[in-house]
Amino acid sequence: MTSASLTSLYTDIIFEHDKRPLHAGLREPFEGEVHHVNPTCGDEITLRLHLTGPVDDPVIEDVSYDAQGCAMSRASASMMADLLRGQSVERAAEISDSFELSMASRGKDAGDEELIGDAVALLGASKFPGRVKCVVMPWKAYRAALVESLAALGAAEA
Amino acid sequence: MTSASLTSLYTDIIFEHDKRPLHAGLREPFEGEVHHVNPTCGDEITLRLHLTGPVDDPVIEDVSYDAQGCAMSRASASMMADLLRGQSVERAAEISDSFELSMASRGKDAGDEELIGDAVALLGASKFPGRVKCVVMPWKAYRAALVESLAALGAAEA
Amino acid sequence: MTASPTPFDVEAVRRDFPILGRTLADGRPLVYLDAGATSQRPQQVIDAEVAFLTSGNAAVKRGAHQMAEAATDAYEGARERVAAFIGARRAEEIVFTKNATESLNLVAYALGNGDASTPDRLRVREGDEILVTEMEHHANLVPWQELARRTGATLRWIPLGDDFRLDLTDLDSLLTERTKVLALSHQSNVLGTVNPVRELAERARAVGALVVLDACQSVPHMPVSVADLGVDLLAFSGHKMLGPTGIGVLWGRYDVLAELPPFLTGGSMIEEVFMDRSTYAEPPARFEAGTPMVSQAVGLAAACDYLDGLGRENVLAHEGALTRRAIAGLAEIPGVRILGPALSDDRAGAVAFDLAGRHPHDVGQVLDSLGIQVRVGHHCAWPLHRRYGLHGTTRASFSVHTTAAEVDALVDGMAQVVAFFDRFR
Amino acid sequence: MTASPTPFDVEAVRRDFPILGRTLADGRPLVYLDAGATSQRPQQVIDAEVAFLTSGNAAVKRGAHQMAEAATDAYEGARERVAAFIGARRAEEIVFTKNATESLNLVAYALGNGDASTPDRLRVREGDEILVTEMEHHANLVPWQELARRTGATLRWIPLGDDFRLDLTDLDSLLTERTKVLALSHQSNVLGTVNPVRELAERARAVGALVVLDACQSVPHMPVSVADLGVDLLAFSGHKMLGPTGIGVLWGRYDVLAELPPFLTGGSMIEEVFMDRSTYAEPPARFEAGTPMVSQAVGLAAACDYLDGLGRENVLAHEGALTRRAIAGLAEIPGVRILGPALSDDRAGAVAFDLAGRHPHDVGQVLDSLGIQVRVGHHCAWPLHRRYGLHGTTRASFSVHTTAAEVDALVDGMAQVVAFFDRFR
Ligand SMILES: Cc1ncc(COP(=O)(O)O)c(C=O)c1O
Ligand SMILES: Cc1ncc(COP(=O)(O)O)c(C=O)c1O
C-alpha cells in the first residue's frame, strides 16, 4: 500500500539514473570547479565544467561530477549532466531556469518536457519542500561553476 | 477612598522618619563603608559603621549614612540606625535577623516589636514584594559594612 | 475633557484582550499603562500559537517529514510576514532572536568576531570609535561598552539637550571617519522623543559608519519601513508589539548580513562541520543557532496581522491622542514635571514624569492601589535620568486597547497621589 | 512481540497531547518518532502558558505594580520549579536562556570575556586547552571551536571507539593541567550512549578543568540530579522535555556563576550604568539580559510537573523498553545497521541506523508516506557520522506518549522500505 505521491517521486527512471549515473566522475580539462554541500543532510557534490567556443557564446563541452546523496539528488545530477552537455550556455540557462521554476511550484507546474526532457521525472519532488533542496543542489552547483568558468574564460581571452 | 493595604504601608511614623531621618549624614570615625544600589529603581545608600569595644564583643558606636530613595527605604535607614546604635553586634544580629525574616513573610508575620521597635511599621511593605527590596537595602548595607568593619578591627588588633 | 474620536473601535479591540477583564486588589479594574515595558496579547495571537502547537508543531529545517515541513512553512511564513510588516525587501533580511537585547548583542559581538576575511567596515578594532546617544536604553548601550572594552575601540555619545532631544551641536566632531558604528534608538522609551533617524543615517553613511537602530518603541506604535530609514540594522521585540515573549527580530540589509561574521554557533547555522573547524550558512540561518522559537514566530506573525488590521497609521493616531491627553492632563497637577518634549511632531509614546518631593516608587504605589499599572524607576535608561538630575520617573505608556478614560484615570489618580501625600506634610 | 507492560497508562498520557489526534497525508495516523529533535506539548503545558497570558502577564522584575509582582512571582516560581527538577541546591543556580545552544554559547563566550579581575580558572587564554568529544552535537562543539579561535586556545577531543563509546585510552594525555574546560554530552543524540560523566568529571576536577555538560538528551528522559554528577555547568532545552520552544536552561554551581563574567548585556543584568562603564548584578540576573521568556518559563515549570507526575524513573523505564524493542526489531531487517551500543545499561534514547545502499533521505521519505515521522541526516553531529563513514542516518526517538505499537510500526515500516526499493533493483 504505497502512497500515490511516493510513487510519483520514486519512478523507474529515477532509479535508473541513481544506479547508473550518466557522465559521473571528475574529468579534465575544466575551467570551473565547485564543491557544494547540503548542510541539513550532509550531501555533497563536486562539479566541474568545461566550456568551449567563443567567449560571447560558449558551449558546454563537459559537465563532470562526483555526487554523494539520496536517489533524487544523484538522479538529478545525472539527468542534468546529460541535458546540459553539448548545449550552448544560453540554451542551458533556459533549461535550468525552467527546471528550477517548476521545482519551486510545489507540484503545481508539471514542467516543460520539450526543454527539460527526462528531468520532468524529478518534479515529483516539488511537492516535498524538504526534498527540493536535494534535487536542486546539482543545478546550483552548475550555476556557480558557470560563473567561475566564464571568469576563467574571460581572463584567458584578455 | 484609599485602600487598606496602602494605609498600612504609609503610616505617620514612616513619613516622620522620611521627613526627619535620624542619624543621617556621613560621619567619622568609621571602620567600614559600603555603597549599595537597587538596580531596578536606582536608589542608593552609602553607609558607615563605627564599632568600639573588644574585638570578640564589639558595640555599634555609630551608624551614619546617606540614602537616596523612596519613603519606605529612607524610613528604613533611619529606623535601623536608631535601633542599632549602641547595641552590641550580637544583639544587632538578633534584631536584623528578626526584621529580615518578618519582611520576607509576605505579610504573614507581624514582627517582634520587643526586638525591632518602631521598625514594625516597615512591615506593611512585606505584602508588596516589589517594595521589600527598598526596605531591606539599608539592612543589607549594614551587614556588608559589618563584615568590613570586623575585618578592619581584627587587622588593627593583630 | 471629552474623549477624542478614535480611528478604530477601542471597545471592540478591548474585547480581543482577555486579560483586560481581570480585576486587581480591592476589586479595582485593571488600568494597564505599562505597554512600553511589555504589551498584552490579543486572543488572536494566543490562538495562533495554540493552533500551531496542537496541529503543526515539529522541529523546523532539520526534518524531511511532513510535520517538519509544515512547521518549517509556518516558521518561514512568519519570517515573510515580519519582513512585509517592516517593509524589508526580502525575507532573508529577518533574523529571529529571543528579544531586541539579543538582536543588539548579536550585532555588537559579530562586529568583534571578524578575521582577515571580514570586510573592514564590519570589524571594530582598536582605534575605531562607536557612537551612541545619551538617551539609549541599556540594551543599546552596555553591549557597545563591552564591544569597546573587548576590542580597544572608544565609545562616544551624542548628549541630550535641555529640550529632551539629542544635542547635535558637536555632531561633526563626534561622527567622523573614525566612527565605525552609530547606534541609536528610533524613539526614546522615556522621553518619547523620535530621533531624526534619516538625517543621522545620512551623516553616518557619509563617513562610512554602520547605523544600528533600536526600534523597540517605534515598530509597535507607528508605521516603520526599513526601506525609508536608511539604516543598516534594526532591532525590536515581539512582546512589545502584542506578540509573545521569547522572540525578537534583527533586520539587516542583506549585503550587510551576508558579510557579517556569526555570533551564536551550533546547529542549523553551519555549512560543514569538522572537529577542528566549521564553515557557516548564508543569512538568516547563519544567525539562528539552535532550535528556534517556532510557535513564538507564529504568534508574532499573528501580532503583525492584528496591528496591520487596525492600521499602523490608526494606531499612531490613537496612541498619539492618548499621549497628548496625558501630557495636557498631567501638566495641571501641581508639582508634576514631564520628562520629554512638549507636544510636537517628533514626540509620541511614553509619558514619564517626576512629582516634586516624591519618589516614583511612592507615586507608583498609590497609583497601583487604584488599579493603575505604571512603571517606576529608571526604565533601563539610567544615564538619561542622571542627565536630568533624577534617579527615576513614573512612566505611563499606551497601547491599542488604552482608552481616553484610562488616561483620565491616571490624571485623576495623580491628583489623589498628591492629596494622599499632602496628609503627611 | 507483545507489548511489554508500561509503568504508566500510555493511552491516558496520549490523551493529554492534542496533536496526536491529527492525521497526515492519505489519512495516515501520526506516528511521531522525532521527540529527540523536539517533543510535543501536553495540554497542561499549553494551558499553563495561556492561563498566565490571560491573567498574570506583565513585565517581570522591572515594575512595582501588582501585575508585575504576579508575573515576577510566576517567573521566579518557575525558576524554583526547574531547580527542584534537576536537584539544584538553590534557585539562583538556574539561568533561563532561549535554548541549550544559547546556554552553551553563554559559557563559551563568558570564559573568553574575563579581565584581570576574573579568576584564572574562569578565563580561557592562549596556550590553554579545551577538551570536547567526537560525539558532540554541533551546539557543544562549534562554540568551543570559536572560543579557541578567539582566544588562541587549542581544541582537543576524546575520540569515539568502534563500540560507539568514548575511547578513553589516551585520556591522560588529553586531559592535563593545560585543560581549562571539558565539555561533553550526557547522552548522545545519535548513539544513545550515556557517558561516564561522574568518572570524567572527577578526572577533570583533578586537573582543575571546568566541566560543562550538554544534558539535552538526558534531562527529558531520565532522573538527573546535578548534585550527583559532579559537573560545574549543565545545559538543556525546554522544547525537548514537553515544554515550550524559546526557553532553555543553564544550570551552574553558584560559586562558578558568581565569578563568571557576563555574556549578553543590557537591561535587568546591570547594577549601575554610566555612559562609559557599567557594573553587573549577581547571578542569575547577570546572565539574563533583556525581557525574559516569561510565559515560556511558566510552561516549562508545567512540563516539569508533568514529567515528575509520571515519575522520571518510570519515563526512563518506559522509553528504555521502547529503545530495546526498536533495536531488537530493526536488527531483523536485512541491511539495517544500528549506530550505537547494543542493549546495555549505558544506552537508551535515540535509535539511529543505516540501511545498506540506501540514503537516509530515501528511507525517511518512505516512512513518512506511512505517517512515521523520523529524522534523517547527520542530526547536527557531523563529525560523529564521519567517524563511522556515514553522511547521515535515519533516527527514531521516543517520548512518554510513544507506544510499543508505534515502535512496531517503525519496524514494519522498515520492512516496507526494503520491499519498496527492492522493486527497483
Ligand atoms: C545533544 C544535544 N545538544 C544540543 C542540542 C541543541 O539544543 P537546542 O537546539 O534546543 O539549542 C540538541 C538538540 O538539538 C541535542 O540533542
Ligand atoms: C528602547 C528600548 N530598547 C531596548 C529594549 C529592550 O527590549 P527587550 O527587553 O525586549 O530585549 C527596550 C525595552 O525594554 C526598549 O524600550
Image: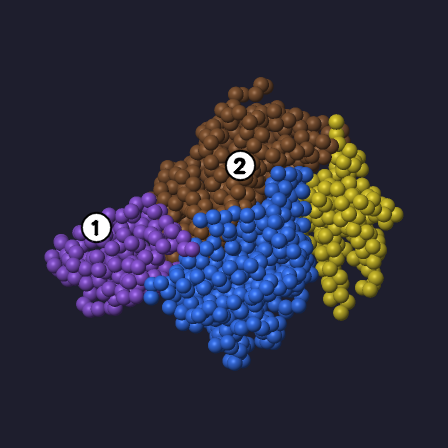
Chain colours: A purple, B yellow, C brown, D blue
Residue at the image point whose x is 40% and y is 39% from the top:
C84
Q: Is residue D368 above or below residue D415?
A: above
Q: Dot 2, how many residues are within 10 Å of its Cα: few (below 14), some (14-19), or many (20+)?
A: some
Question: Residue C367's x, y, as percent?
Answer: 67, 32
D371 vs C174, nearest the viewer: D371
On the image, which quarter does residue D385 sit in? bottom left
Say what amino acid the circle numbered 1 marks: Leu
The residue identified by callout 1 is: A115
The answer to whether residue D180 of the structure is visible from this angle is: no
Q: In the structure shown, which secondary structural element does the residue marked by tag 1 occupy?
A: helix
Distance Cα–Cα, label 1 vs label 2: 47 Å
Q: For the residue carrying disc 1, how many other residues have a C-alpha within 10 Å: few (<14), some (14-19), or many (20+)?
A: some
Q: Is residue B91 visible?
A: yes
**Residue B86 position within the rendered picture, expressed as x and y whole percent measured from the top left:** 84, 52
**Residue drawn at (46%, 55%), measured in percent from left and top?**
D370
Quadrant that contains the N terminus of chain C: top right
Residue type marked 2 = Gln
Q: Is residue D98 found left or right of C19 in the rendered image?
A: left
Residue picked out by circle 2: C44
Q: How many marks?
A: 2
Residue occupying image coordinates x 56% and y 36%: C43
**Left/right of residue C351 with respect to residue A103 in the rendered view:** right
Chain where mark 2 sits: C
- B120 to D168, vertically: above or below: above
